[in-house]
Image (cartoon, rainbow, N blue to C red):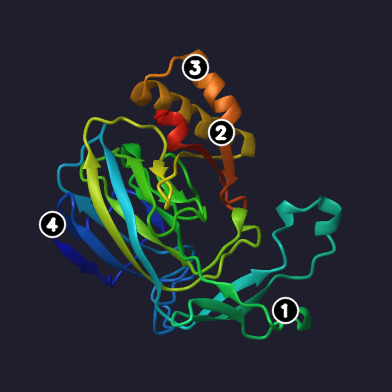
Amino acid sequence: MATHSLDPESFFNTIGTHEAALRVQPGDTVVLHALDAIGFDRNGVQRAEAPNPQCGPIWVEGAEPGDALEVRIVRLTPSREIGWTRYPLATNVVEPDRATLFPQRETAEWRVDTASWTARLVDPPASLADLTLPLDPMIGCFGVAPLGGEAIATSTPGPHGGNMDWRGFRVGTTVWFPVAVPGALLFAGDGHAVQGDGEICGTGIEISMEMELRVDLRKGWPIRWPRGITSDGAEIFTVGNARPLDQALQHATTEMLDWLGADYGYDLAAATHLMGQTVGYDIGNVYNPAYTVVCRMRQDVVRRG
């Protein structure tokens, strides 16, 4: 098992069947030097266009359609001292009459201190002068090439993953993506130092980031949507991406139902009882062209000893 470094000269604003930037073996680790959401690197130099320029793709030897690509998030380290957000809230997350009163969106800077592992506004409103947030780095956009040679914009999530902006994609989390093309072709970028649920401002604290990922394969596991295990190991989860929001929930719930049946042996009645009384849901992004819903279940409940 080897460790690779990828500090690309070129980046992609679509996730698709592009020429591989790196080839790795299952079990290898890759350290990606990712740009921020509008293409600025660790030195504050713009090296790619918005939105969400991606490192990659990474070809994983032996990956074939019908497999699942496993990605474990090993380390996420902001690689510069200044991040940024936009404000006010996105207009689609408040009632329409309130949205008409919002001022034009502006950008705020945050000082990100990896020594103290905190973030502070550079020029805060008076009421937030003492606000200090602990860092909770996450990956905003990552996934694999979709089926049929399609290239999907990095603004838009789907069955392949993409711009899901779920804060659960943090260090320790394991994610499986459905492999649709040979090599899987993994992309990643769009690091956030901190973000609340839903990405309701349209940003987290956007920043360049070193992303250390370990890749592996689960052969002959034909999943339809991303699945995973949370960073603390306590829960399994499934991800649905679509608009409207209820369709994203349907995808996530159906994927969990299928997982309980195929891998844990529950029939429809048993799965219904178990999910109906124990399932949890998170809202990922509600800003992008497709929304994200995450369906979660505790492993101790699913495995039942």
Q: Amino acid at mark 1?
A: Leu
How far from the left and from the top, in percent, is residue 214?
26, 56
Badges 1 and 2: C-beta atoms under 8 Å apart?
no
Question: What amino acid is labelled 4 in the image?
Answer: Met
The Cα atoms of the two marked residues, 4 and 2, are separated by 36 Å
Vertical relation: 28 (above or below) 88: above
- The residue at which mark 2 appears reads as 279
The residue positioned 64% from the left and 76% from the top of the image is 107
Q: Label 1, on which residue? A: 128
Q: Looking at the image, which residue is at 33% across and 47% down?
A: 144
What residue type is disc 2 on? Val
Counting residues from the start of the chain, the first of labels 1 and 2 encountered is 1
Q: Amino acid at mark 3?
A: Ala
Q: Nearer the viewer, mark 1 or mark 2?
A: 2
The residue carrying mark 3 is 270
Q: Determine whether the residue tagged by mark 1 lies in a helix, strand or loop.
A: helix
Choose the circle earlier in sequence order: 4 or 3: 4
Q: Earlier in the sequence, mark 1 or mark 3?
A: 1
What residue does disc 4 label?
1
